[in-house]
Amino acid sequence: MSGGVDSSVAAWLLLEKGYDVEALFMRNWHDTTGLLQSDCHWEDDAMFAEMVAKKLGIPWHFVDLSDAYRQRVVDYMFAEYQKGRTPNPDILCNREIKFDSFAVEARKLGADHVATGHYCRREVMETPDGIVYRLLRGADGNKDQSYFLCQLSQEQLGYALFPAGHLTKAQVRAIAADLALPTASRKDSQGICFVGKVHLPTFLQQKLKARKGKVIEIPADFRRPEWEPGFPGEGTGDDYLTAASEPYRFGPESGKIIGEHDGAHFFTVGQRKGINIGGYREPLFVLGSDIGENLLFAGEGQSHPGLYRKGLLVRDDEIHWIRRDLAMNIGESREYDVRIRYRQPLQKARLYRREKGMYIIFHKMQRGITPGQFAAWYDGDELIGSGVINA
């Protein structure tokens, strides 16, 4: 129980179904470096969680998982930013903490399941080879959180419960109000999972040093790779897949120097805030970076062609199948719907399994494909697999 309205209502829904429910609150972070003062701290979350537990008449427990969180989520974040990639800590938190370290603590209390307030659904399916757990999108299209669970395994889904997945956010709020739960009108949490809303450069400077470098403006008519932008048909060659999935390779000669930055590793593709260079009709957006040379490449306007690409690559060792029984073989290709960020509408794409990894080629050009983020592929409502965007 996190202290938010979703987990509060999830607990009540389980009680209504006859489950023996206990609340377990976890503290995951102690350091306040970079934390915005307007954001609630963990003490407030714990207080609300305990108040809800008392209101529902269920036991309340507290566990500190800060060491595991730092080692398995935050250290990963720092390492990824240092490489010039942009990680998704919420996805890592679910895989490594909520449905791993936290689940271990829950079992110590005698739990058979771990339930959360995520807006997604789990379905149990019997097959000739045994039980398969399906992860489905939440009923609320605006709040579907299945993407955040795209790295869970069959084993983790086996003990997971998502009681609120069939409801909309408005319905959850209404239930909480009817029950007079303390969290009924509490705002949703924002920022890094269990850390809060932070000023990212300040937070990252705990381990990554600021380093002055040049900002280079890339003109809108820059030379793009020579490949046809049309959707590739079955049997497309590997040369095309490689070209279509590679990020644009900018260098010092690709444009003109227009200013300085404090460290290329503090920026992400598509970012607008923080460049702090004026004199343009439209805002500047980050198109890419060269971490080795500490160069930041930017372009004017949100429609700059440098923000749009046709495909991406997930390295072979970073492909994850929730439905292991549907894993693709090398040489195989399939049509799926793909999402590369939370709340992005699903995009039509063809996936190509090759020895190097999974090439994902979209029907339409995609804005802001970001190395380090996760691509998740769906068949209808079901999330089939995912992987870290390598390039």
Image (cartoon, rainbow, N blue to C red):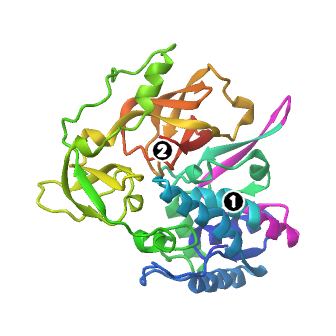
Q: Name the secondary structure under disc 2.
A: loop
From the top left corner, tell me how far across and down residue 130 is, in percent: 86, 35
Q: What segment carries the magenta color?
A: 103-130
Could you tell me the amino acid type at mark 2? Ile
Confirm whether the magenta stretch covers residue 289: no
Taking the image as drawn, is residue 260 in sight? yes
| Left or right of 53 on screen, residue 168 | left
The span from disc 1 to disc 2 (Cα, nearest Å) is 20 Å
| Left or right of 206 on screen, residue 273 | left
| Left or right of 75 on screen, residue 363 | left
Please tell me the numbered disc located at residue 96. Answer: 1
From the top left corner, tell me how far across and down residue 281 is, in percent: 11, 54
Q: Residues within 10 Å of mark 1 (few under 14, many from 20)?
A: many
Q: Is residue 337 above or below residue 169?
A: above
| Residue picked out by circle 2 | 340
Q: Is residue 199 above or below residue 146?
A: below
From the top left corner, tell me how far across and down residue 381 is, in percent: 58, 39
Q: Quadrant of residue 294?
A: bottom left
Taking the image as drawn, is residue 138 in sight? no
**For marks 1 and 2 on the same chain, the one whose residue lies earlier in the sequence:** 1
Please report the residue visible at 44 percent of the width from the left and 32 percent of the height from the top. 245
| Left or right of 152 on screen, residue 18 | right
* Viewer-closest of 101 and 6: 101
Please report the residue visible at 62 percent of the width from the left and 86 percent of the height from the top. 47
Q: Name the secondary structure under disc 1.
A: helix
**Mark 2 and mark 1 in contact (Cβ < 8 Å)?**
no
